[in-house]
Image (tube, helix red, strand yellow):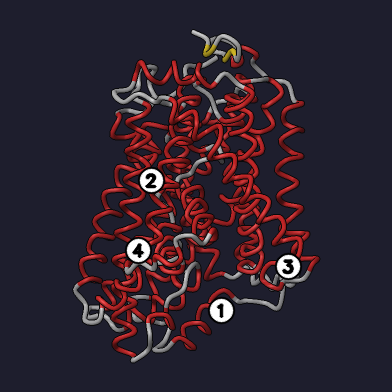
Amino acid sequence: MESREQWGSRVGFILAAVGSAIGLGNIWRFPYTAYDNGGGAFFIPYLFALLTAGIPIMILELGIGQKSRGSAPLTFAKLNRKWEWVGWMQTFVSFVIAVYYVAIIGWAFSYAYFSINQAWGADLGAAEGFFYSYLGITGGQFELGGIQLGVLIPVVLAWIIIYAALAGGVKKGIELANKVFMPVLFILIIIMAIRGVTLEGASTGLNYLFQPDFSRIFDYKIWVAAYGQIFFSLSICFAIMITYSSYLPKKTDIVNNGFMVALINCGFSLLAGFAIFGVLGHMAFASGMGVEDVAAGGVGLAFVIFPIAINALPMSELFGVIFFISLVFAGLSSAISINEAVLSGFMDKFAVSRKKLVNIYCGIAFLVSLLFTTGAGLLILDVVDHFINNFGIVFGGLVEIILIAWLFNLDSIKNHINPMSDFKVGPWWSFMLKIVTPIVLGYMAIANLWGDLTTNYGDYTTTAIVTFGWVVVVATIVLGFVMQSVSWKDQEYLSGDAFDKQSGLGG
């Protein structure tokens, strides 16, 4: 059994963990979610969700990963041999996300190039047509239309960067990459935020984002949206933070690290909000439209609306490049962590070295990702992303919390974390994990299930929904049990610092 790799420094771990948490969703999902859910009033449930679910789960995952010194499957196997499948399910969820996430990074690469001459055109109709033409959009998920060369080339570039980081290992690959990506990303988003808030009409956009509508504070949908944003943006409950924390030294301030990663991630989201809505306010002012007419979330914001907003900026070519390179860096830092979570699971299970496995893994992942470079790529991605987030992550998180908080000795984890941390977790931490988080996740799971059973997502065909939605989610669970049935190549991985649910964490 080889000794486990470690981060070169605490700063390196923080940057890598923050890089994982900060992704494309911070830039295109958070600002619109806040705007669409009561503006400034949204920050009350958002902060509540952060303190009652986001940070407690972050501390939990950092604690068990650091103690087990293993991937998510190994960690759950040490908690209880019968729970290994949960770690594998989360690992396969990460794999699914990894193979479509890289396509979006590829789009951002292309749009950084398109920014030089603003190839997307002068109005929203032109920008939408350009985006669909660039992707070679077909009539449905089963009409692939062939691989689009303009998408394939940047996807290959993204995979080369991801491969280099994974092959370099924890210290010389992942940590080094994030020491470059994160400072540059923060500098770029700060530049965009400063420019955004100083534009004419920016105040209108910022008012839409931050002006509180307290009449909506008792609307349960706002609270569900707040918790959903926290779960989807902190890289919790799908193997990543458990994996990253497994590379920490034996003496690590878990609580402090957990708070830092969560708060830095939220701070970045706010910066992105200033940048996005400052520019949208200027766009609305320049075009005579209302902010509500140009505000949107997701892919539409990044690749249709925001390009037109960039057109209206002074030095628009420069700020177009800055915005899309920001997307690239945010995407790459997250993609590296997602792939590392998968790679680590297989390295542990089959006791194989990183050097031997990384070529095989990246080759397979690249081949699967080719599906999202076809003309049907966006349509397939839309369905897969919806189901893997709303069911894969939520269900995996719900099972994780119920098993650990209710069926495991949670105090034993607390007793491991507290001696190493300046700030101690106490009854509040246990209460949040045992009561608040399961209730919220359970409600989200039921609400999501009811919604998707009664109405087809996106008005797609039932065949497409079943094939690229339900089948993908069920496959992550089935494969989890399949992998659990496979013997560990080196049984020593399961010994040593094994967990004991009766007496606490083993010494």
Q: Position of residue 394 (x, y in %)?
A: 61, 46
Disc number lying in front (1 or 4): 4
Q: Find the distance from the CA under tag 3 to the CA under tag 2.
A: 34 Å
Asked which secondary structure carries label 3, the reply is: loop
Mark before the other along the chain sequence, 1 or 2: 2
Q: Find the distance from the CA under tag 1 to the CA under tag 4.
A: 34 Å
Mark before the other along the chain sequence, 1 or 4: 4
Residue identified by numbered label 1: 132
Disc number lying in front (1 or 3): 3
Lateral position of residue 35 relative to residue 99, left or right = left
Mark before the other along the chain sequence, 1 or 3: 1
Asked which secondary structure carries label 1, the reply is: helix
In this view of the protein, can residue 32 be seen by the observer?
no
Residue identified by numbered label 4: 40
Disc number lying in front (4 or 2): 4
Comparing 35 with 326, the one in front is 35
Residue identified by numbered label 2: 19
